[in-house]
Amino acid sequence: MSATKTTDVPSEAPPAPAGTVKSLGMRKNGKQWHEPKKAFRPSSGLTSYEKRAKQRMEMAAIKAKEKEMKEEKEEARQQRIKTIRERREAKAERERYQLLEAKMHKKRVERLKRKEKRNKLLNS
């Protein structure tokens, strides 16, 4: 009879609900809020040569663009400095000419006064 008798035992375990996570039990140190540690994998941070080469190319393009922008900015700055310097030189030149003009006029006036004084002395 044992050969003909069938038992009602399922071959598979009942499926676990989809929303639950397997419980690892109580931690020994009691810090349940920390995430469980994972195995250290030193090769996980390595990137492929293609990725690094692509990143280098991107960085080179960025640096070239930055350099170009800096050169444009410096060129504009130098142009402003040059125009300011030219304006100052022109202003100094104008002032120098005005001073010479005034000085020449004064000298001429003084010369005429001395001449008049000599004439007065001679005539009197």
Image: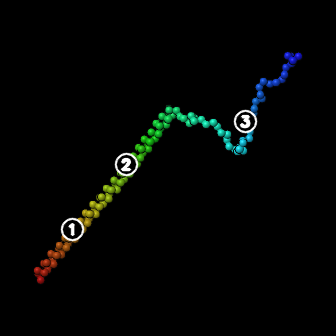
Left or right, 105 with respect to 35, comes to left
Residue bearing mark 1: 104
Residue 19 in sight: no
Name the amino acid, label 3: Lys
Q: Please state which of residues 118 and 8 is positioned toward the viewer in this rendering.
A: 8
Frontmost residue, 79 versus 33: 33
Q: Counting other residues with Cα less than 10 Å from the Cα at mark 1, is it few (<14), some (14-19), or many (20 or more)? A: few
Residue 75 is marked as 2
Quadrant housing residue 66: top left
> Closer to the observer: label 2 or label 1?
2
**Residue furthest left in the image:** 122
Q: Quadrant of the N terminus?
A: top right
Mark 1 vs 3, N-terminal side: 3
Residue 109 can be seen in this image: yes
Q: In the image, what residue occupies the spot 73% across and 35% down?
A: 22
| Gap between marks 3 and 2 measured at Cα | 66 Å
Q: Is residue 29 above or below residue 95?
A: above
Classify mark 3: helix, strand or loop.
loop
